[in-house]
């Protein structure tokens, strides 16, 4: 039971930072596309790369949580 | 109620002396054979006028990826493209192989219990770590080929103490890139498989369909991220500007 709480906290706390980061990245990308709609395709590619980077942090804590849970 | 079957490491299908042949290794070999066969059978048609549709499709996909590589490295695209495209294709099909019907569900009954016969190639930390080491080592090789011994000056610079320390940090950053490569890919693909297993466990019918679509997208994005990052690192390593 205690282990489950630790696993839950790991991914819950680890998810906060990436959540904020992804929100900021997409917000800024939408702002950029709004100002310059012709550059949408270029902004989108870089945005997806940036989102993948930010998401990677959440994935690290997910890996740690899964290791705690299943190993 | 049946037990939820999740294993964080790839499980051995059979072992020969100390060597364990895991289900991820089987998929790795199958994906490699598939890609090589596709390339060889596609190559025969390259100089013909009338090509079958699948060859045209392959050419379109490869060319669009080539255009993407050109947009990042305009000067050296022809040199970097084969490596980056190989990584892209292998990661893409390695991740998608784990989504095929039958993967994770068809298996063998061994002394350790149920062992699935197929598991996504990149859902194993050994595969992703091997790919990451391969990618980072090729970055060093490209750096050496383009800039000679001047490339290694980045790591070992005795001109002043600050540069020496910066070189030490550069060395650490190469290793952290490697680890981040390996964990990002493994985490994303394995998390996807866990997600699918849990959804299929909770709602057996139809509910996992949208998540299957999500996983196809995630596999594509991760392959793109892995190859783009390799390309960007090679680009940084080969550029003369310091």
Image (cartoon, rainbow, N blue to C red):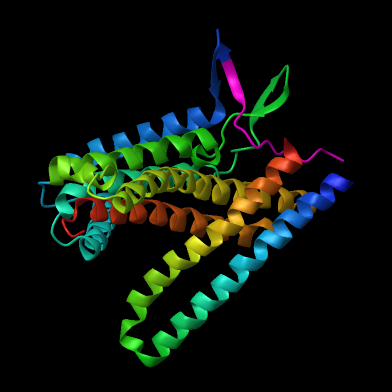
Q: Quadrant of residue A35?
A: bottom left
From the top left corner, tell me how far across and down residue B32 is, in percent.
37, 34
Which residue is pictured at 27% across the width and 58% down the height? B65
Question: Is A19 situated above or below B55?
Answer: below
Q: Would you say residue B40 is visible in this rendering?
A: yes
Left or right: B219 in relation to B34:
right
Q: Residue furthest right?
A: A1
Question: Is B44 situated above or below B113?
Answer: below
From the top left corner, tell me how far across and down residue B13 is, in percent.
59, 21
Q: If the image is split into quadrants, where does the N terminus of chain B sit?
A: top right
Which residue is pictured at 40% across the width and 85% down the height? A32
Whether residue B11 is in magenta: the answer is yes
**Majority SS type along the magenta span:** loop
From the top left corner, tell me how far across and down residue B109 is, in percent.
70, 22
**Residues drawn in magenta:** B1-14
B242 or B63, which lies in front? B242
Which residue is pictured at 15% across the width and 51% down the height? B78
Q: Quadrant of residue B61?
A: bottom left
Left or right: A29 in relation to B229:
right
Q: Residue furthest bottom?
A: A35
């Amino acid at each position: 039971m205690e282990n489950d709480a630790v696993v839950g906290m790991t991914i819950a706390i680890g998810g906060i930072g990436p959540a904020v980061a992804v929100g900021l990245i997409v917000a800024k990308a939408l702002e950029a596309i709004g100002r310059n709609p012709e550059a949408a395709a270029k902004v989108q590619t870089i945005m997806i790369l940036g989102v993948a980077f930010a998401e990677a942090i959440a994935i690290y804590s997910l890996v740690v949580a899964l290791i705690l849970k299943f190993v | 109620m049946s037990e939820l079957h999740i294993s964080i490491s790839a499980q051995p299908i059979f072992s020969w002396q100390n060597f364990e042949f895991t289900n991820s290794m089987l998929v790795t070999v199958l994906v490699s054979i598939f890609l090589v066969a596709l390339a060889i059978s596609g190559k025969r048609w390259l100089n013909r006028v009338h090509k079958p549709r699948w060859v045209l499709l392959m050419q379109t996909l490869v060319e669009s990826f080539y255009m993407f590589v050109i947009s990042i490295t305009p000067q050296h695209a022809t040199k970097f493209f084969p490596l980056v495209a190989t990584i892209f294709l292998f990661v893409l099909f390695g991740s998608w192989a784990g989504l095929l019907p039958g993967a994770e569900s068809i298996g063998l009954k061994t002394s350790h219990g149920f062992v699935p016969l197929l598991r996504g190639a990149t859902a194993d930390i050994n595969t992703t770590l091997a790919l990451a080491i391969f990618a980072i080592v090729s970055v060093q090789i490209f750096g050496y080929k383009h800039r000679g011994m001047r490339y290694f000056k980045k790591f070992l610079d005795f001109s002043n103490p600050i540069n020496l320390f910066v070189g030490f940090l550069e060395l650490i950053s190469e290793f952290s890139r490697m680890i981040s490569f390996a964990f990002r890919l493994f985490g994303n693909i394995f998390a996807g498989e866990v997600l699918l297993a849990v959804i299929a466990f909770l709602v057996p019918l139809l509910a996992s369909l949208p998540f299957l679509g999500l996983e196809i997208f995630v596999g594509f994005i991760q392959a793109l991220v892995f190859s783009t990052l390799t390309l960007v690192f090679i680009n940084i390593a080969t550029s003369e500007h310091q």
